Image (cartoon, grey):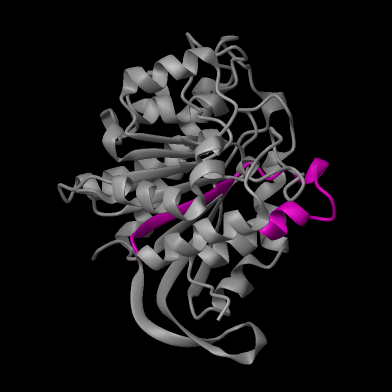
Amino acid sequence: MSGTGTNETVVATAPGGGLQSVPTRQIRVIGVPLDMGASRRGVDMGPSAMRVAGLEARLEALGHRVTDGGNIKVEVPETQAHGAENARYLKQIAEICTRTADAVLKTLEEGMTPLVLGGDHSIAAGSISGVSEFYRRRNQNIGVVWIDAHSDINTPETSPSGNVHGMPLAALLGLGPDLLGNIYGYAPKILPENTVLIGVRDIDAAERANIKRAGVGEVYTMRDIDERGMRTVIEEALRAAGRGTAGYHVSLDMDWIDPEDAPGVGTPVRGGATYREAHLAMEIIADHGRLLSFEMVEVNPVIDEHNRTADLAVELACSAFGKKIL
């Protein structure tokens, strides 16, 4: 099995009653209601908010077959010791990420596409580890398309906050922390030349150094998008992530989008992608057809407006899985 969960092409009803052809996927939804990696509480309710927004039905309307695998077990933070101040709850987060990795690996082994719902962005250390392990067993590498206002490439030694949701990319690239980076007993999980950052606009000084130290291939800031346009940026990014790989995992932090359109996120930052830019990026990802797995993180219903952000997350997932205007 390829692990992408793609099947035959089916004809689905498009908006307005027209018809569109999309490659059918068998998709398994995996919720990870984790908020121990962040200082602001509430993103643990993100998976429920996206489900309430009709994720399964809207994907099935495109012709996909969707099953919900439920939620990964996550401990309640108030019952846990937070450990070291420079990486709070690291031990618990690493355990939850290992469970997430196992669920993603099992999904790929069963020929399905994982769709992971966060939770804070630390869950990516688990989801991407599962994808990496699946393809490592087949002597293949994967790419990662990291779409985020932040680079999440701090380590416990460089983090100004001690929040682990700012560390998953560092862990995946082998910079540490080891507890998070050594799931399945090896590191790094991904190659820097196949790792791309898109839409970053809030990067710590130490993270700039870590990006250079890791040798990350392509970093596209919001200025790059402003100057060159979303289409050019996404096309280049996907080529880099896909070069010599089986395909790529897309990790979408909803704070990438401007708070005007996505107010309910864990760490909002002004000056993000617009509604249409976000959809265009997802539509181009669908056009390329090399998506191995997908995750959406940092939806925070506590500070959202009438579930707007979760609803947008579901819309973007539909675009990434083939929904077209015509």
Please state which of residues 222 and 188 is positioned toward the viewer in this rendering. Answer: 222
Q: Is residue 288 visible?
A: yes
Location of residue 172 (image quadrant): top left
Query: Measuring 55% from the left and 17% from the top, which residue is drawn there?
Result: 204
Percent across and percent down for residue 191 are 27, 34
Q: Is residue 293 located in the magenta-colored stretch of the structure?
A: yes
Q: Residue furthest right?
A: 306
Please state which of residues 305 and 5 is positioned toward the viewer in this rendering. Answer: 305
Percent across and percent down for residue 115 are 49, 57
Q: Is residue 177 visible?
A: no
Percent across and percent down for residue 133 are 28, 43
Q: Is residue 89 located in the magenta-colored stretch of the structure?
A: no
Number of numbered discs visible in the structure rendering? 0
Q: Residue furthest front?
A: 227
- Figure check: 182 above or below 60: above
Please state which of residues 53 and 182 is positioned toward the viewer in this rendering. Answer: 53
Location of residue 277 (image quadrant): bottom right
- Figure check: 197 above or below 54: above
Percent across and percent down for residue 295 are 51, 50
Query: Measuring 63% from the left and 43% from the top, which residue is drawn there?
Result: 33
Q: Is residue 53 left or right of residue 162?
A: right
Query: Measuring 32% from the left and 33% from the top, which residue is drawn there?
Result: 217
Magenta-tinted stretch: 289-312
